[in-house]
Amino acid sequence: MKKFFWFIGCAVLLTACQKGRTYFPKDIEPQEIEIVRFDNALMNVHEASVAHDIRVLYEEYPEFMPLWVEDILGIPSADTAYLEQQLPQFLNDTMYGFQQTNRLEQEIFADISDIQYSINKAFGRIHYLYPDTEIPAIYLFVSGFVTPIFFEDDLIGIGADMYLGSEYEYYNRVVYNYQKQTMRKECIPVDVVSAYLFRTLPYTSTKSRLLDQMLYRGKIMYLTAQIFDDLPGYEIMGWTKDEWDWCVRNEQAIWHLVMDKRDLFKTESLVLSSYLNEGPFTSEISQDSPGRLGVWLGWRIVESYMEHNKNVTLQELIEEGDSQKILEESYYKP
């Protein structure tokens, strides 16, 4: 089943997650994962030879091309006649900025060796933890501003046109300001890995209280931070450094407010979405706060739990479904 990810990612002190336990030996072999350049292949489609070029795409990318046509263009993959009309417009339109965007994407992503290195290293660590886990194929594509990341079975698609830099002018038409922080090329590895972890690692709690949801997301953030142990926490969260610093300064007040309101054990969707979903701020806390503050709190609790329980492995942390146990044994008291 397909899932689109609007990140999500791009939550103590700045280097706290690097100061704690280490879980990986230094000699882990990176996974050799090819990033398939479907974006380049699309740019070889020309209006004068569109029928032939589309046939070539279906032949060379038999798994990904139908998915891209249906999920990005919204066209039935079998309707090649309509596709022949729409694809040149998608690639060359100037009204919505597709032509300009596609041209810039080719410039920014001419060299992806940095992304390739980070992803290979990250999946090497994932394979070390979960050797039986199937490593996905990865495709780079342009999405017409539809999505940064999507999954289908055993493949991951990266919408490169969603990572052209936070200041890219056309983003003002399609996203909110608070979403732009993670729309940078360097955010791709964290987005890919965290999306992969959310998709493949199970939610083990039998309940759906705010506490359970916070700790599940906190586990994934903690694991992501260990995989990318050279990155500061605010990059893992997809925040600015100022947003991170605000949370650090106000951590005690934030926690006391959550406890005073007894929000941890609430299940109302409005409460959960306020704490966990992307937004300009966390409405249950303060308009000065960043969004997804509940995810950051979950991460902080999990981090404290792992520091107080040094015999617990990363795999055991992920599998632990007793949220009350994690909270109590974390001794989290900011």
Image (cartoon, rainbow, N blue to C red):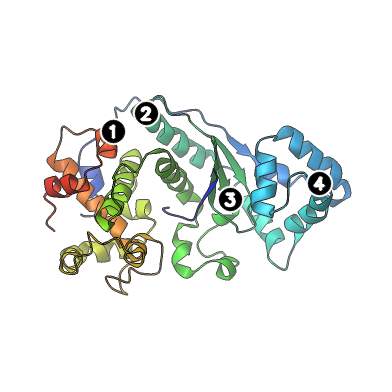
Residue under pointer 2: 130
| Element assignment for label 4 | helix
Dot 4 or dot 2: first in sequence order is 4
Residue 182 in percent (x, y) is at 45, 57
Dot 3 or dot 2: first in sequence order is 2
Number of residues whose C-alpha sits closer than 10 Å to that of mark 4, classed few (under 14), some (14–19) or many (20 or more) = some
Amino acid beneath label 3: Ala
Amino acid beneath label 4: Thr
User: Distance from label 4 to label 3 (Cα)?
Assistant: 24 Å
In contact (CB < 8 Å): disc 1 and disc 2: yes
Q: Residue at x 35, y 59 (%)?
A: 276
Task: Identify whether 16 is placed above or below 288.
Answer: above
Residue under pointer 3: 160
Number of residues whose C-alpha sits closer than 10 Å to that of mark 2, classed few (under 14), some (14–19) or many (20 or more) = few
Q: Residue at x 28, y 73 (%)?
A: 286
User: Distance from label 1 to label 3 (Cα)?
Assistant: 32 Å
Dot 1 or dot 3: first in sequence order is 3
Q: Residue at x 35, y 54 (%)?
A: 237
Dot 4 or dot 3: first in sequence order is 4
Residue 23 lies left or right of residue 332; in this view the side is right
Viewer-nearest of discs 1 and 3:
1
Residue 42 lies left or right of residue 157; in this view the side is right
Residue 281 lies left or right of residue 40; in this view the side is left
Q: Quadrant of the C terminus?
A: bottom left
Residue under pointer 1: 315
| Element assignment for label 2 | loop
Viewer-nearest of discs 3 and 2:
2
User: Distance from label 4 to label 2 (Cα)?
Assistant: 41 Å
Dot 1 or dot 4: first in sequence order is 4
Q: Is residue 60 visible?
A: yes
Residue 290 in percent (x, y) is at 34, 66
